Image (spheres, helix red, strand yellow):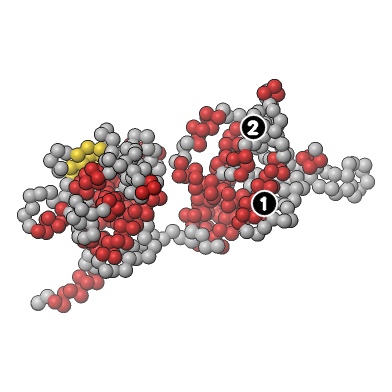
């Protein structure tokens, strides 16, 4: 009990006769008000979890100290955190997986301590996409490490501690958007301040406004790569003739063309299905109708109705009136998609559209990260085939800004663009994705007057 209830060892200095150790000012352990089922609780087992962990022990509140033999390497820091938590939790029955990874498991413990049933907690946590939960988990672990070095309870720390951590991120050169993700992760796992989340505290809000002024969000002014170079390369070798190219090149070409012609996120492209209820081709090859797997949950849940079926028409279908039309037909996404579905029909092991071609994973569905690598690799191969050096820092997400900016320049209404890209407001496109693809420039138009005769 002394490590729990007694905060320090200071003795009375005024001779009033009080006990030498003072009582802790902040409660660090809370027991449930309901009676525990002691008959089904086994000491040392995972059964009968005692929900005491709205504020488990931590080295700053209970006098525990870190081991002096901890290594300074990442493995040493990780083991030190495990040792700290193991000492702090004692014999309270917490699953080992939650001890070693207190990401959104920390949020589950907070919600459990509030008396919510497990199924309710699961539903609440599924309000975020799986990728968001995974990202928050990583950010929360970084915050845990920072708190462990300073002997601070991460989920009970003060506003000052959170602001100091965020300032450290800014001092290390982290972007404002990255700092926002860290704050969201902390708000999800912190117990809150004054009956509200720590992310909505007035001082935190003012800090983030100041950080935004000092570190403004900037978007690229010009396209990161040349669309004309990529499209020209896709219509030639090694991506043609499409009947004889290897499956890898066919997959890369299909992924890149669908990304450019649909303006969808990588997660939406990865969720495309070849099931007859999700993908259909017109008998004459003039169009393709497809949509994502019905079980797919989009990134923006409030606008799930905008993730609708895509009706993709053929591009310069036969008969051809000129060799140029025949070349342009090589860029037809319907033709490429149909060929890819036919080539992978016998080897695929799921209904997901994009599957692996590697020998050890052949036919298995690929992840979003792998699909992103495919799109970047396709752009690099296009530049290499044209004997050009590919730009550095290529990202698959750049296809959304590239395709929508060119669509706006070619006369497509901004409402149609937002509907295709699943954006609820044109402000998202204008603020983050719109690129300057206009040609010729104002300067060239003015200087071109010199070539005109008066």
- Is residue 386 in view? yes
Characterize the local packing of mark 2: few (<14), some (14-19) or many (20 or more) Cα atoms within 10 angstroms. few
Lower sequence index among marks 2 and 1: 2
Residue beneath the point at 55% across and 29% down: 118
Q: Position of residue 148 (x, y in %)?
A: 66, 51
Pointer 2 with pointer 1, Cβ within 8 A: no
Residue shown at 47%/36% (left/top)?
Answer: 126
Residue 108 at x, y percent in the picture = 57, 36
- Residue 142: x and y, percent? 58, 52
Q: Which mark is residue 395?
A: none
Instruction: Indicate the secondary structure of the residue bearing disc 2.
Output: loop
Instruction: Judge left or right: residue 228 versus residue 298.
Output: left
Which residue is labeled 2 in the image?
Answer: 46
The answer to whether residue 401 is seen in the rendering is no
Residue 86 appears in which quarter of the rendering? top right
The dot on residue 80 is 1
Residue at x 40%, y 50% (from the top left corner): 369
Horizontally, residue 390 falls left or right of residue 36, namely left
| Element class at badge 1 | helix
**Towards the viewer: 37 or 124:** 37
């Amino acid at each position: 009990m002394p490590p729990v209830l007694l905060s320090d060892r200071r003795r009375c200095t005024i001779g009033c006769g009080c006990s030498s150790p003072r009582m802790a000012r902040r409660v660090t352990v809370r027991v449930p008000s309901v009676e525990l089922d002691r008959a089904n609780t086994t000491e040392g087992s995972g059964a009968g979890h005692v929900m005491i962990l709205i504020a488990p022990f931590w080295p700053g509140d209970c006098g525990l100290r870190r081991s002096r033999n901890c290594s300074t390497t990442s493995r040493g820091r990780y083991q030190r955190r495990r040792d700290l938590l193991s000492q702090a939790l004692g014999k309270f029955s917490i699953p080992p997986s939650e001890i070693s990874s207190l990401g959104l498991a920390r949020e589950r413990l907070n919600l459990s301590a509030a008396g919510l049933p497990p199924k309710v907690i699961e539903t609440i946590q599924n309000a975020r996409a799986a990728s968001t939960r995974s990202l928050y988990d990583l950010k929360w672990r970084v915050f845990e490490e920072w708190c462990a070095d300073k002997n601070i309870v991460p989920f009970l720390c003060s506003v000052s501690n959170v602001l100091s951590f965020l300032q450290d991120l800014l001092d290390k050169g982290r972007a404002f958007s990255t700092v926002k993700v860290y704050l969201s992760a902390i708000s999800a796992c912190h117990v809150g301040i004054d009956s509200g989340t720590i992310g909505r505290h007035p001082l935190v809000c003012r800090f983030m406004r100041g950080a935004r002024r000092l570190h403004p969000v900037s978007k690229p002014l010009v396209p990161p790569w040349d669309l004309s170079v990529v499209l020209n390369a896709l219509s030639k070798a090694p991506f043609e003739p499409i009947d004889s190219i290897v499956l890898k090149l066919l997959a890369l070409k299909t992924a890149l063309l669908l990304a450019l012609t649909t303006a969808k996120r990588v997660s939406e492209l990865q969720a495309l299905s070849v099931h007859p209820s999700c993908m259909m081709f017109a008998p004459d090859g003039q169009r393709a109708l497809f949509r994502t797997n019905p079980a797919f949950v989009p990134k923006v849940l409030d606008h799930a109705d905008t993730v609708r079926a895509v009706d993709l028409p053929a591009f310069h279908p036969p008969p051809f009136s000129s060799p140029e039309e025949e070349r342009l037909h090589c860029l037809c996404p319907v033709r490429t998609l149909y060929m890819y579905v036919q080539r992978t029909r016998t080897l695929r092991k799921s209904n997901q559209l994009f599957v692996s071609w590697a020998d050890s994973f052949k036919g298995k569905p690929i992840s979003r990260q792998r699909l992103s690598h495919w799109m970047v690799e396709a752009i690099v191969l296009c530049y290499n085939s044209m004997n050009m050096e590919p730009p550095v820092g290529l990202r698959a997400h750049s296809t959304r800004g590239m395709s929508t900016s060119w669509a706006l320049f070619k006369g497509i209404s901004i409402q149609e663009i937002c509907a295709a890209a699943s954006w609820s407001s044109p402000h998202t496109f204008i603020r983050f994705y719109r690129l300057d693809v206009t040609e010729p420039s104002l300067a060239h138009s003015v200087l071109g007057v010199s070539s005109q005769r008066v």
